[in-house]
Image (spheres, rainbow, N blue to C red):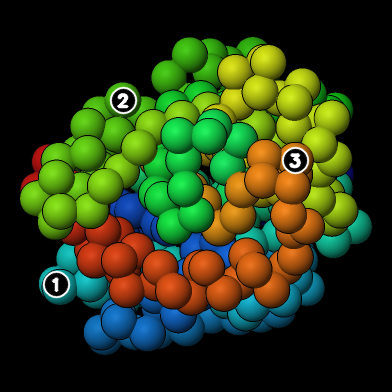
Amino acid sequence: MTTIEQLRESAQVICDTFGEIPQTAMVLGSGFGEFAKILTDTKVLPYADIPHMCISTAPDHVGRLVCGKVNGVPVLLMQGRLHHYEGYSFAQTVYPVQALSLAGVKNLILTNAAGGINTDYAVGDFSLITDHIKLCDPSPMHGANIPELGPRFFDMTNAYDKTLRTLALQAAQETGIALKEGVYAYMSGPQFETPAEIRALNVLGADLVGMSTVAETIAANHCGMKVLGISCVTNMAAGVTGAPITSEEVNETGAKMLSQFSTLAAAILAKIAQNR
């Protein structure tokens, strides 16, 4: 069980390593880890060097914090995340988010590779997450509450912050990058979903599906952080086209879209910095 003492130790190491902590952190999803290479004035902290924190085992998830600047805008990157399918509890997967909150991060940008359920989507599309569906238990906040982080019961009406979404849409328009909006459904994986599961999620109103992001969003809202979620449609979900889904397809699409993602992410970070 996570304790406030553990989180404070982790946060202290983060602060000691990086000094002044940026207001905004970004979690880099599958295919987007190379975004860290565009940062300047970088400092790096491997997850293995942060007390009480688990390490990333998923392919393409390096497992380190990278602090630096994008076009002069400070940002703290999680180059790789923790997933429930790796064998971690939901509480363990959100531990980095909670530690970053204690370290001083106020805005959290969560990025991911997702399957497209909505047939108006195409592979390579970017979409803001407007809301999510999580049908599996437990919540990452299951168990004793840590009042220093947030209240026992907390609101999720604006889980994906409307102001940040507006800024992201403005950044997309100015860069000429199409940015859709949709509901993200969480499925625990590591297997891809069945066609029947996708049909059910479609009936429930989901536009996207993936194996991350939602637990982090819940924890960030508990901590009072503002969350922005961005998905890249790296494949159409099971049964939509009839084609099988592979992890290679997911990673290849992410790599192809890295340049556009980097442009969009840099513009969004600038917008957030200007809106303080």
| Closer mark to the observer between disc 2 and disc 3 | 3
Disc 3 secondary structure class: loop
| Label 2 residue SS | helix
Identity of the residue drawn at 53% across and 18% down? 156
Q: Disc 1 designates what residue? A: 72
Residue positioned most to the front:
242
Residue placed under numbered mark 3 in the picture: 239
Residue 247, can we see it? yes
For mark 1, give the secondary structure.
loop
Q: How many marks?
A: 3
Q: Quadrant of the N terminus?
A: top right
Residues 98 and 59: in front is: 59
Q: Nearer the viewer, mark 1 or mark 2?
A: 2
Report the residue marked by disc 2.
162
Image location (x, y in percent) of residue 64: 57, 76
Residue 264, quarter of the rendered image: bottom left
Q: Amino acid at mark 2?
A: Lys
* Label 2 CA crowd tier, 10 Å (few <14, some 14–19, many 20+): some
Q: CA distance from mark 2 to mark 3?
A: 32 Å
Amino acid marked by disc 1: Gly
Quarter of the view holding residue 15: bottom left
For the point 74% across and 32% down, the residue is 198
Q: Is residue 132 left or right of residue 166?
A: right
**Which sits earlier in the primary sequence, circle 1 or circle 3?**
1
Q: Quadrant of the C terminus?
A: top left
Q: Nearer the viewer, mark 1 or mark 3?
A: 3
Bin the neighbour count of mark 3 within 10 Å (Cα to Cα): few under 14, some 14-19, many 20 and up.
some
Q: Position of residue 63 (x, y in %)?
A: 63, 75
Residue 45 location (% of width, % of height) = 53, 80
The residue shown at (22%, 32%) is: 166
Give the CA distance from mark 1 to mark 3: 44 Å
Residue 72 to residue 181: above or below: below
